[in-house]
Image (cartoon, rainbow, N blue to C red):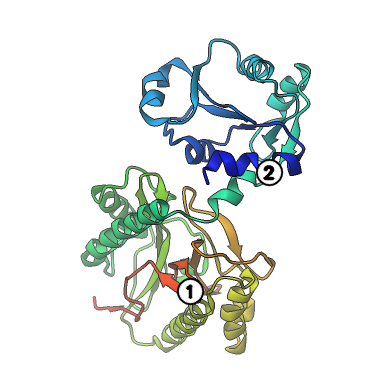
């Protein structure tokens, strides 16, 4: 069923007779438009894509199945005019994206707005074959760049230099944009799950966490690997690594359609607790990946949402010891009926780097 038809099926439940889509990612999902200025209005029988004159030619090339309209007046007036022309009296709007200022101006124009939450996101959560193909291409680009980074990982170089080189390699692999800034975190900095690269030099015995993503046709990938620089006393670093690796394995093996997301989280979390590190794993086990690098489903102890076939998400347990260092291993999976299809292929065995 077409995306627009699936959306219209929800109108009655949402108590709307049309919907205004302004989130750029959701606009792209519905229309294929890759520009930075545009919105969508869908009624029971019509679908209108609106942009400004700068993107007219681009819209004509990219947007199919929508009436394309070029803005000729102030945006709230344009929205009101379209609603009047197509008989929309109770438009839904994306409450996570419309600003209070825009909402107030639309109310002034006598529109009976109704907030809707996660309507498009609920469609995006299950991937089509085409979307999955794009995600796999994004994974390949990211993995190729990481393999080419290996010769540059050595003692004496800085996190910042490695991150800059890594971003260069990702772009050379064809990534037009990066889903987020590359994370390179070494030594005690690796205990920060979202550390930013610094001028800290890599030292012997350091755990080094690399967290990065690739892109293909707007779709993202996201993965993490942890390496170890050879040193004299590295037994605890190894212990942390193999505990996280086992937690990751248990979580991946638990994936199948029909279970709650929290079951996958528990598979990793319970093992880490058993090893005595439960207090040092504070984030969820994973998150969805698609047009956004962080999207539904959330794989955490809080989420009782049922996992469905063709969802795509990360599995990324970690242990983070303040003042010492941390380990995270992150892979991407696609859900099949009774198993997880592993999308990432980089080795999981601990790599100990000489020199």
| Residue 65: % across, % down | 47, 31
Labels 1 and 2 touching (C-beta < 8 A): no
Neighbours of disc 2 within 10 Å: few (<14), some (14-19), many (20+)? few
| Residue 58: % across, % down | 37, 25
Q: Nearer the viewer, mark 1 or mark 2?
A: 2
Neighbours of disc 1 within 10 Å: few (<14), some (14-19), many (20+)? many
In the picture of the structure, the residue carrying the numbered disc 1 is: 325
Quarter of the figure with residue 201: bottom left
- Residue at horizontal 57 percent and vertical 89 percent from the top: 275
Name the side, left or right, on which 267 lies relative to 175: right
Residue in front for this viewpoint, 50 or 293? 50
Q: Marks 1 and 2, how far apart in space?
A: 48 Å
Name the side, left or right, on which 77 lies relative to 107: left
In the picture of the structure, the residue carrying the numbered disc 2 is: 10
Name the side, left or right, on which 125 lies relative to 33: right
| Residue 167: % across, % down | 32, 51
Q: In this view, does 236 lie above or below 41?
A: below
Quarter of the figure with residue 76: top right
């Amino acid at each position: 069923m077409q995306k627009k038809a699936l959306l219209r099926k929800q109108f009655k439940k949402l108590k709307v007779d049309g919907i205004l889509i302004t989130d750029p990612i959701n606009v792209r999902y519905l229309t294929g438009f890759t520009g930075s200025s545009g919105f969508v209005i869908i009624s029971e029988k019509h679908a209108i894509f609106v942009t400004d004159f700068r993107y007219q030619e681009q819209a004509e090339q990219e947007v199919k199945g929508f009436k394309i309209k070029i803005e000729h007046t102030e945006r709230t007036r344009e929205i009101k005019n379209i609603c009047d022309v197509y008989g929309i009296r109770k438009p839904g709007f994306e409450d996570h994206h419309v600003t209070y200022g825009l909402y107030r101006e639309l109310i002034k124009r006598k529109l009976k707005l109704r907030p809707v939450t996660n309507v498009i996101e609920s469609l995006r959560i299950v991937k089509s074959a085409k979307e999955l193909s794009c995600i796999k291409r994004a994974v390949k680009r990211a993995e190729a760049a990481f393999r080419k980074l290996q010769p540059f990982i050595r003692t004496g170089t800085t996190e910042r230099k490695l991150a800059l080189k890594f971003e260069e390699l990702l772009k050379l692999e064809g990534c037009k944009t990066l889903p987020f800034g590359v994370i390179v975190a070494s030594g005690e900095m690796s205990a920060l799950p979202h550390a930013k690269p610094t001028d800290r030099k890599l030292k012997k015995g350091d755990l080094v966490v690399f967290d990065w993503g690739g892109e293909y046709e707007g779709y993202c990938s996201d993965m993490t690997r942890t390496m170890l620089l050879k040193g004299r006393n590295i037994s605890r670093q190894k212990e942390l690594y193999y505990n996280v690796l086992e937690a990751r394995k248990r979580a991946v093996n638990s994936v199948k359609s029909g279970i709650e997301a929290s079951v996958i989280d528990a598979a990793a979390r319970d093992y880490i607790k058993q090893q005595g590190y439960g207090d040092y794993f504070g984030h969820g086990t994973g998150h969805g990946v698609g047009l956004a690098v962080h999207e539904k489903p959330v794989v955490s102890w809080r989420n009782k949402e049922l996992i469905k076939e063709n969802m795509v998400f990360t599995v990324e347990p970690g242990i983070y010891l303040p003042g010492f260092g941390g380990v995270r291993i992150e892979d991407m999976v696609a859900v099949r009926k009774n198993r997880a299809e592993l999308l990432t292929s980089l080795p999981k065995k601990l790599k100990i780097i000489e020199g």
